[in-house]
Amino acid sequence: MLRQSQVLKLQQKLSPQQIQLMKLIQLPTQALEDRIQEELEVNPALETESQADEDPFESDHEAPEDDYSSAEEDERFPESKEQDFSEELFDDTPEYRLNANNYSADDETYEAPIVARMDLSDVLHEQLALRSLAPQKEALCKYLIGTLDDDGYLRRELVDIVDDLAFSLGIFIEPSELEEALRVIQSMDPAGVGARNLQECMTLQLARRPDTPTVLNARALVVRYFDELAKRHYSRMMQGLGTNEEGLKSALEEISRINPKPGGSATQGAEPSQVVVPDFLVTAIDSKLELKLNGRNAPELNVSREYKEMLAHYRQAKGFDSDKQKEAFSFIKGKIDSAKWFIEAIKQRQQTLLLTMSAIMRYQEDYFLTGDDRKLKPMILKDIADEVGMDISTVSRVASQKYVQTPFGTFLIKRFFSESMTNSEGEEVSTREIKKILEESIGEEDSRDPLTDDALAVLLKDKGYPIARRTVAKYREQLGMPVARLRKTL
C-alpha cells in the first residue's frame, strides 16, 4: 500500500568549490604542477603571470567591468546559469594561447638529458647473435630471454613453458631440449643470469671462479649446506667442511661478493632517479625557525584580460541577436567563473598548508633545531587539528605524500607523527625515540653474540623504556633488522 509522508532530514553537502579545494590540498608539489597545467589547457580564461599583461587577479579587487550583480545577471539571462559549467561548447581559442610556462623569467630551466639504456633482454640478445646455434635452439633461447624477470631469474617451471610453446606457438619439444637452451643462456654474461632460484644463481657465479680452496669451500656451502648457510649455523658448517673458523670466514667472504640480482648489473646507462620535490623548507637562523612554502606551490595565476573584455562586451549588449551569441556568453562566463574558483582554491590551499605545517614545526621545534630523533614529541593528527582548528581529515590531506626540507635532510611530513608511550618516570615519549634507542642498542652489540629480543627488552627497561618483548620484535622488524641469529658474525 502506497503512503505519502513528510520527512525532515538534515544533510550536509560539499559544494564543487569545496571538493576542488580538498583535492588540491592532497596533491604534492609535482602533482599540483600537473594539475595546474591541465587546468590551463582546458580553461582558456586562466593564464599564468608570464602570459598576463596586467596585475594578478585578486578576488577582493576585481576590474571595474567585473562589478555586477549575479542575481541581476541570472534574471537577464536565466539560461546562462544552467550552462556555467558546460565544457562541451566549441572552443576556437588558438592553441598557442593555451600553452603556458609555469615559471617566472628568473627561474633556471633544466631539461634532463635523454639517456639511451639497454635492458637485460637487449644485452642477452646481442650475445645470442654472436653464437652459432640451430634455428630451433636459437628460437627457444629467445623465448626464454623474454621470460626472464628484470633481476635475471627464470621464475617459471620449464614444464609450464613447454606447455605454453605447444598451445600458443604449436612448438612441441621435450623439457630436456628447453633445459639445453637454458644452459646456453646461463653461460652468458652477467654470471648467474637464467638461474631458477638464489642457490642456482650463486652456484653459477662460483662456477666461473678459479678452483682455489676458498672457492671450493664456498661452492660446498652453497650446494650442500645451503640451509645452514641461510640460518648461519656456523658450527655445523665448519663441521661439514672440516675446516676451522678462519677457513669458514674466507669462504663466507667469497660468497658475500656474489651478486644476488645479476639482471640489475646488465643494464647499460643510468637509470633515471626519482627526484623528491620538497613542499616546505624549514631553516634555522639564530635558533629561530623559519618556514617557507616551495615557490612551485604558489604559482601566479590570473583571469585572462581578453576573456574579461569579451564578457564585458556581451554584458553591455541589451540582448543577443542569435542563439550562438547567447551560447558564447554562457561559455565565457562559465570559464571565467571556473578560473576564479580555481585561483581562489590555490590560495586557500597555500594558506592551509602553511598554517598546518607551522603548527607541526612549533610542536616539534626541538627536533627541527637539533635533528635528534629522540627530541621528537608524541604527536597525532588530532593534536595538530585541535591547534589549527581544522578537521582531522584536512590535516591528514596536508601531511599526505608531502615532504619538508630541513637542515638535516628531506623527510615525509608523516614521519613526525607517532604514538606515545610512558617511560619509567611517567613521562610520555614518542615511539620514534624508543626505536632510535633500540637501533643504537643493536648497533652497539657484540656481533659474535647478538642480543635476543628478550635481552633487548631487558636492556630497554634498564634505560627507562619498559616495553614487552613482542613490541621489541615489532619495532625491530619496522627498522628492517633481522633476528639475533641472522645478525651473528664470526
Image: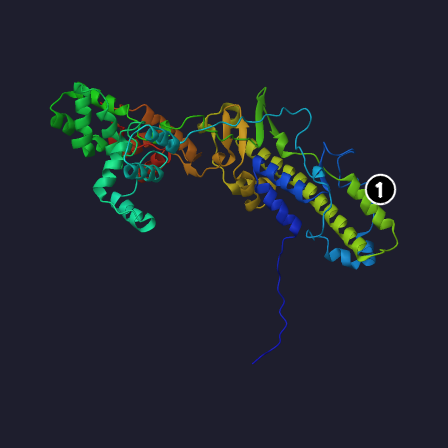
Task: Indicate the position of residue 474 as horizontal and vertical percent values.
Answer: 34, 38
Residue type at mark 1 is Pro
So how many labels did they put on this image? 1
Give the percent coordinates (x, y) of residue 220.
Answer: 16, 27
Residue 121 horizontal side relative to residue 116, left or right: left
The residue under the point 31% across, 51% down is 167
Judge left or right: residue 326 versus residue 274: right
Structural crowding at the residue carrying mark 1, measured as other residues with C-alpha within 10 Å and reported as few (<14), some (14–19) or many (≥20): few
Q: Residue at x 73, y 55 (%)?
A: 83
Picture quarter containing residue 258? Answer: top left
Give the quadrant of the C terminus.
top left
Residue 484 can be seen, yes or no: no
> Could you tell me residue 359's position as x and y percent?
58, 35
Residue 428 lies in what quarter of the image?
top left
Of residues 32 and 459, the one nearer the viewer is 32
- Foreground residue among 61 and 274: 274
- In the shown orientation, is residue 76 left or right of residue 227? right
Q: x, y (%) of residue 307?
A: 78, 43
Provide the secondary structure element on which disc 1 rests.
Answer: helix
Q: Quadrant of the N terminus?
A: bottom right
Q: Is residue 215 visible?
A: yes
Residue at mark 1: 64
